[in-house]
Amino acid sequence: MLDDMVASEIGARYDLGEWWTVQPLSDGFRIGAEAGDFRVAVSTAGRSDASLRFEAMLLSHLDDKAYLSPRLVRTRAGRPWHRSAAGSTVLVTEWVGGGVVD
């Protein structure tokens, strides 16, 4: 279940609009919202800024090269991720549909 405090911070920090659905994933949540479908990766307090910076830079690079990958959604302040008051990190990307390829 999505922690109420983290959910509140996501709503305040990201411009997703009204949420319609929240589905748990192994590392976070899928949120269906007014602005689209999103993957919200929530990491424990132990995830380093270097690790987050690498993931954000990789996603931005792939997007710049028009490679089909999840597009990074920045916070309202333009940051690539948010560190919650509880110490968890939140990184939001657009949801990319797909399936297993043989």
Image: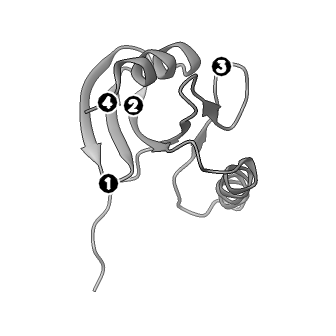
Sort mark 2 into few (<14), some (14-19) or many (20+) by Cα contacts within 10 Å: some
Given contact means CB atoms under 8 Å apart, are the residues at marks 4 and 3 in contact?
no
**Residue bearing mark 4:** 2
* Residue pictured at 64% horizontal, 55% vertical: 59
Q: Kindly report the distance in space between the C-alpha atoms of the residues bearing marks 4 and 2.
A: 18 Å
**Residue bearing mark 1:** 26
Q: Kindly report the distance in space between the C-alpha atoms of the residues bearing marks 2 and 3.
A: 16 Å
Mark 1 and mark 3 lie on one chain; the one further toward the N terminus is: 1
* Residue pictured at 44% horizontal, 24% vertical: 6
Residue at the limit of the structure toward the bottom, as seen here: 102
User: Residue 50: which quarter of the image?
Assistant: bottom right
| Identity, as a three-letter code, of the amino acid under mark 4 | Leu
Q: Kindly report the distance in space between the C-alpha atoms of the residues bearing marks 2 and 1.
A: 20 Å
4 relative position to 91: left or right: left
Q: How many marks?
A: 4
Q: Quadrant of the C terminus?
A: bottom left
Sort mark 1 into few (<14), some (14-19) or many (20+) by Cα contacts within 10 Å: few
* Residue pictured at 67% horizontal, 50% vertical: 52
Mark 2 and mark 3 lie on one chain; the one further toward the N terminus is: 2
| Identity, as a three-letter code, of the amino acid under mark 3 | Arg
Disc 4, SS? loop
**Residue bearing mark 2:** 36
Q: Kindly report the distance in space between the C-alpha atoms of the residues bearing marks 4 and 1.
A: 12 Å
Q: Position of residue 56 (x, y in %)?
A: 68, 50
Disc 2, SS? strand
| Identity, as a three-letter code, of the amino acid under mark 1 | Ser
**Residue bearing mark 3:** 76
39 relative position to 65: left or right: left
| Identity, as a three-letter code, of the amino acid under mark 2 | Gly
